[in-house]
Image (cartoon, helix red, strand yellow):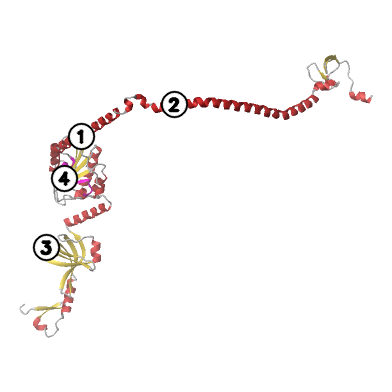
Amino acid sequence: MGAGFEQYGEGVVPQDSTRSEKPPLSVSAAMALAKQSLEAVTVRLVGEVSEVSVKPGYKAAYFTVKDSAAALPCMMWNNRYRSCGVQLAVGQLVELTGRFTLYAAKGRMNFDVFTLALAGEGDLRLKVANIARKLAAEGLTDPARKRPLPPFPERIGLVTSPRSAAVHDVLRTFRRRYPVAEILLAGVPVEGAHAPLGIIEGLRCVVSAGAQVVLIVRGGGSFEDMMPFNDESLARAIAACPVPVVTGIGHEVDTAIADMVSDSRASTPTAAAEAVSPSRENLDAIMTARARSLSTNASIVLERSRARVQRLQDRPMFSDPMLLFAGEAQSLDVAAERLGRALPTQLERASQRTAMAHSRLERVGATLTDRFSYELRTSAARLADLSPVNILARGYSITRDKNNRIVSSVDQAPVGSNIKVMVADGTLACEVVGHTLLQASLSG
């Protein structure tokens, strides 16, 4: 090995035996050979991002990943970077897939990244960030939709683990600050895959039991422990809750999606209990202030009423009641006088109008009957001409049988039958003794 070796193509030959047979490579040829060899290897690696350069106009994203012993410059074409869905930031733990390559112009080695994903907790934070952006786009995290907390709730719902330190902190706070409240406790799991469903069910139960405000709390823990409170379905249940929801999850530095959609976010479970419970000192101060305000307002109202009564007492009508009706009484007297003068005149005019109307009616009535009198006389004359009495007066008669039926034929009055013959001045009772036919008489 003392002679040394140089690499040519794919073979390795001793330096002293080949130096005169093959010419040396140029720098660009050597870099091309190295580039070809490196790009044949694809690897997957994990590292922490230490530098990021993503600028408008660049064709690629440039960053560096490192571990405790080494650093690796990386580049990722923009189309791949945009499709991976990760926004690079210093300190992220990322998992990369790609190949080594050389930038011949500068003699630098880069790692050409094919795929990029957050690793470990970073991947969870990316999922949480995506959910948070989605809910924010729907307006569920908008401060304008958050409701005020009731100042003096009688029933307070508490959703947490029944075996945690958080439940004892909350109950202790209520006993100290607001012992009159009724606490509705829903014991649920706050860790694990099924925790979100349990918290949702606990929220539903305390609301159904009449809670006016609900606390969702748990103690501190790792980011992974807090993942149930980043669940999208739990966030939507909190946003849809008919009463205000206060969250006290983890420590002050922890912020879960449940905190973002709740009506009020407290830094700790104890702070959440304090947010919905007025302290005794505050209650005393409020009551004192209210009593002082009530007393002041009552004094003002009484003073105003006293002054008003005094003003009413000083009015003239209370010393002389007739002043209240003086104007109306005078108006009534004037009206009575005018009526006394006007009534006789009106009656005289009405009498004159009545007499004139009666005279005019008599004149018109006489003219109205003339035409009808003439028609009546004419009709009476025609009726007299048709009267049977006048016919009888001219020598005619009417014959009736015993049944008072008119006899118009000799066949209706057989020989021996009794008949009545009506003439102009009376009726003749006759008996038929024989018949004489008109035709026979004419022919004879």
Side of 164 where 381 appears, left or right: right
State the residue position of label 1: 296
Question: Which residue range is magenta in the image?
Answer: 260-276
Amino acid tagged 3 = Asp
Amino acid tagged 1 = Thr
Q: CA distance from mark 3 to mark 4?
A: 35 Å
State the residue position of label 3: 67
Q: Are marks 3 and 4 in contact (CB under 8 Å)?
A: no
Can you tell which mark lies on residue 218?
A: 4
* Precedes in sequence: disc 3 or disc 1: 3
Identify the residue shown where x is 24% and y is 39%. Answer: 207
Q: Are marks 1 and 4 in contact (CB under 8 Å)?
A: no
* Precedes in sequence: disc 1 or disc 2: 1
Viewer-closest of 206 and 123: 206
Q: CA distance from mark 3 to mark 1?
A: 72 Å
In the displayed structure, would residue 424 be above or below residue 303?
above
State the residue position of label 2: 332
Identify the residue shown where x is 27% and y is 29%. Answer: 310
Label 3 Cα crowd, 10 Å radius (few <14 / some 14-19 / many 20+): few
Foreground: disc 3 or disc 4: 4
Residue sticking out furthest to the right: 444
* Precedes in sequence: disc 3 or disc 2: 3
